[in-house]
Every structure is written in structure tokens, then in C-alpha cells.
């Protein structure tokens, strides 16, 4: 709801656009730090911008939309990288087997299907 006016092109001015963009980025980083899936919303907002860019009459000449999309992609990538660096990736070393039992499963097929199920549920929720 905070970002909708930006993506729809109904923002009053540059200052309001920047404030909305910074508010959304702050909320997305906070969501990602709470749970990894919060970072998925960077892709959702960037996808929204990309769709509006492709469907707009100005096309790729919309520099403000391109700037917002670039900023979202850069900050989202940086936030994901920093989280992976801080947590040492997705390795089980910092967790016990009860925190992520799928990661210690010996059968590769079970791991693949389990992760596919989890990501499918996240996609459905989005």
C-alpha cells in the first residue's frame, strides 16, 4: 500500500517518491531480517515496476521507473548478500538438526521435494 502510488505513477513529486521508496525498502529489509522469505517481496515490488515499465506507453524512456527498479534490485541484492554473509549462507553449522531437519536428510530426492513443497507454499501465499 505504501508503494502502490509509485508503481501506478500517481505520486505528487520527487520528494514523496523518494520517501515512499525508502519506506518500502526499510520495511522489506526489516521483513527479510525477521524471516528470509521477507526478501522475496523485493522481487515482488521489482516485478511490479518491471510490468508497469513494459506496459507503459513511454516504455523504456521512463527514467524514473528505471531508476526505482535499479535501486530496488541493487538494495535487494545487497540485503540478501549481507544476510547470507552474516549467517554464513544456508549451512547447518550454526543450527542443530532440529532447526532444519530437511537439510540433514540423507536422501537427495526427499530434500528436493521438501524444498519444492515449501517454495510452492510460499509462492501460493504471495
Image (cartoon, helix red, strand yellow):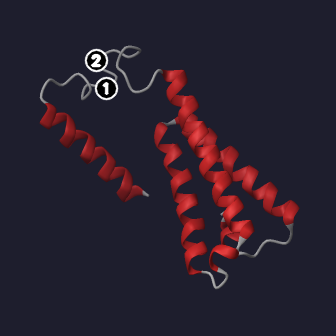
23 versus 56 height, above or below: above
Give the answer, above or below, for where 97 lies relative to 42: above
User: Crowding at label 2, few (<14), some or many (≥20) Cα neighbours within 10 Å?
Assistant: few
Q: Residue furthest bottom?
A: 57
The quarter in which the C terminus is drawn is: bottom left
Determine the residue positioned at 59% across, 74% down. Answer: 52
- Label 1 crowd bin: few (<14), some (14–19), many (20+), radius 10 Å: few
**Identity of the residue drawn at 25% across and 46% down:** 116
Q: Quadrant of the N terminus?
A: bottom right
Q: Which mark is residue 100?
A: 1
* Viewer can see residue 2: no
Element carrying mark 1: loop
User: Mark 2: which secondary structure?
Assistant: loop
The residue under the point 81% across, 55% down is 19
Q: Give the CA separation, mark 1 to mark 2.
A: 6 Å
Locate residue 67, reporting x and y percent.
71, 60
On the rendered structure, is 40 left or right of 53?
left
Asked if disc 1 and disc 2 are in contact, CB closer than 8 Å, the reply is yes
Query: Which residue position is annotated with label 2?
Result: 97
Amino acid at each position: 500500500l505504501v508503494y502502490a502510488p509509485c508503481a501506478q505513477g500517481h505520486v505528487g513529486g520527487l520528494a514523496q517518491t523518494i520517501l515512499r521508496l525508502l519506506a518500502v525498502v526499510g520495511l522489506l529489509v526489516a521483513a527479510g531480517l525477521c524471516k528470509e522469505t521477507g526478501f522475496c517481496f523485493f522481487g515482488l515490488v521489482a516485478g511490479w515496476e518491471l510490468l508497469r515499465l513494459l506496459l507503459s506507453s513511454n516504455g523504456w524512456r521512463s527514467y524514473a521507473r528505471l531508476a526505482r527498479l535499479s535501486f530496488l534490485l541493487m538494495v535487494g541484492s545487497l540485503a540478501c548478500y549481507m544476510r547470507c554473509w552474516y549467517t554464513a549462507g544456508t549451512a547447518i553449522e550454526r543450527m542443530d538438526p532440529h532447526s532444519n531437519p530437511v537439510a540433514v536428510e540423507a536422501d537427495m530426492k526427499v530434500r528436493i521435494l521438501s524444498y519444492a513443497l515449501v517454495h510452492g507454499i510460499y509462492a501460493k501465499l504471495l
